[in-house]
Amino acid sequence: MDGTNRLASLFVESKSNTVLAWIFIVFLVGSVVVGIPLGRYEAALFGLAAIVIVVGPAISLRDPRVMPPWYFLALICLPVFTGTFVPHSLVTSFFPSFALAILGLLLMVELQRFTTLRLVPWFAVVLTVLFTLALAALLTVLRWVADLFFDTSFVLDGRSQNAINTTIMVEFIHVTVSGILAGIVFYLYFRRGPGRPASSMSVPSRFENETPVESAVISNRLNVSPVRQRQIVGVMQVVLVGIFAYGLWTRQLPFLVNAAVALAITFVPAALERDYGIPIEPGLALWMTSAVFLHALGSAGLYDLIPSWDTLTHTLSATVVAAAGYTILRAIHLHARRIHLPTWAMFTLTIVFVLAMGVVWELLEFLVDRSALALGLEPVLAQHGINDTMSDLLFDGLGAVVVAIWGTVYLVGVSERLATRLENWSNG
C-alpha cells in the first residue's frame, strides 16, 4: 500500500465499527440538540462540525459503512461528555484539543479523497499538529473580537488584562501539548499498519503537476541596486552590534538577548548560500533583516515610545515566517513525488503555518517572561496583556495573507532551489 492510500485506512468498512461509530454520532447529535437551548454554543458548534466531518464521506459516497475507527469517535465525544458530567480538571482540559486534532486529521484525509490534494502519513500528521495550533489561535481571536464588538464575555470576562492573558496562555499550552501527543499517536497508528482501508476512500497516487509560476525577483522590484541592498543590511547589522554592546555595558538583559538573536538571524541567508548552496537574493535578505532589526529597535525602547511599532514589527515578522513556511511547503511539493499541494492548499497552509508559529511565539514570550520574573530578572520578551497578544495574532494572520497571495510570484525561485537541494541530498 503506497503512502497516499495508507491515509485511507483511517476509514474502515466493518459491521461492528459501523454500529459503534453511528452510536457516537447519535450522541453528538444529541449534544447539539441539547446544547443550543442550554446556551452551550461552543460545545454545540463543535458537535455540529464533528458530525459534518465524520458523516461527510458516508453521505457523499452513499455508504454508511465508511466510518473512522469507533475509538477515534469516542475521543471526539469526550469533550462533550466531560464538559457536561465531569468537573474541569487538568486532565479533562486536554480533551478538546485532542479531539480537535482528530477532526483535523479526518479533514486532511477527506480533502485528499475529494480534491486534488495528495498527502502521505508523516506529512498529514505534521499538518494536523499545525492545524490544531492554528485553529486554536483563530478561535481565540474570534472570541476576542466578539467580546470587543458584540459585548460578549468569551475572553474579556471582567478580569485584568494580565490575568486573562495568563488563562489564554495556559489554554495554548494545553493545545500545544495535546497537538504534539496527538501527532505521536497518529504517527504510531499509521506506522503499525492499520487495517484494510475502505476502498471507496482510496485515491490515485499520480496526478498532473500544476504549471509552474514564473518567479519575479524582489531585488528588481525595489528600485534599489543589489549592492545598495547589501549595504543597507550591513548598516543594520552594525546597529545591532551597537545595541548588543550597549546591553552588555549596561547589563540590560532585554537589549542583550534581542540584539544577539536578531544579529544571528541576519546571517542566516549567507549561511544558507555558503553551507547549503541555496542562493538567497539580496531582496529576501533585506526583507528578513528588516524584520528582526525593527524588532530589536522596539525592544530597545521604541515599543514604549511608539504604540504602533509592535503592530508594524509583528506584521513584518509574520511575512518572514510566512515566506519561510511557503518556501518549505513548495519545496516539499516539488521534492516529494507522492505529495501534491494545489494552489488553494498552498494559500491555506501558509496561513496555518504562520498562525501555528504565532501560538508558539506567544508561548515563548510567556514562558521566558515567567522564568525571568521567577529569577528576579527583567522580562526579555514582555507581554502586555490579552489585547496585546490577540493583536499580535491578528497581525500575524494579516502578514500571512499578504505572503500567501504574493508567494507564488516572489518565492518560487527559492523554493525550487531548496527542492533541488533536497533532491541532491536524497540521491547522494
Image: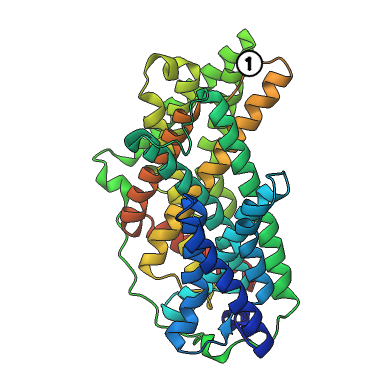
- Residue 101 lies, with reference to residue 150, above or below; the image says below
Q: Residue at x 35, y 24 (%)?
A: 308
* Percent of width and height locating residue 375: 74, 18
Categorize mark 1 by other alpha carbons within 10 Å: few (<14), some (14-19), many (20+). Answer: some
**Is any part of residue 128 visible from this angle?**
yes
Q: Nearer the viewer, residue 156 or 388?
A: 156
Q: The C terminus lies in which quarter of the figure?
A: bottom right
Give residue 421's quadrant in the image. bottom right
> How was the colour assigned to the protein in this rendering?
rainbow
Q: Residue at x 46, y 87 (%)?
A: 61
* Percent of width and height locating residue 95: 66, 54
* Percent of width and height locating residue 117: 45, 74
Q: Secondary structure at mark 1?
A: loop
Q: Is residue 377 left or right of residue 322?
A: right
Q: Residue furthest top?
A: 250
- Residue 426 lies, with reference to residue 159, above or below; the image says below
* Percent of width and height locating residue 274: 56, 48
Q: The N terminus lies in which quarter of the figure?
A: bottom right
Q: Nearer the viewer, residue 107 or 229?
A: 107
Give residue 318's quadrant in the image. top left
**Is any part of residue 418 visible from this angle?**
no
Q: Nearer the viewer, residue 322 or 262?
A: 322
Which amino acid does the dot numbered 1 rest on? Answer: Glu
Q: Which residue is mark 1?
A: 378
- Residue 106 lies, with reference to residue 259, above or below; the image says below
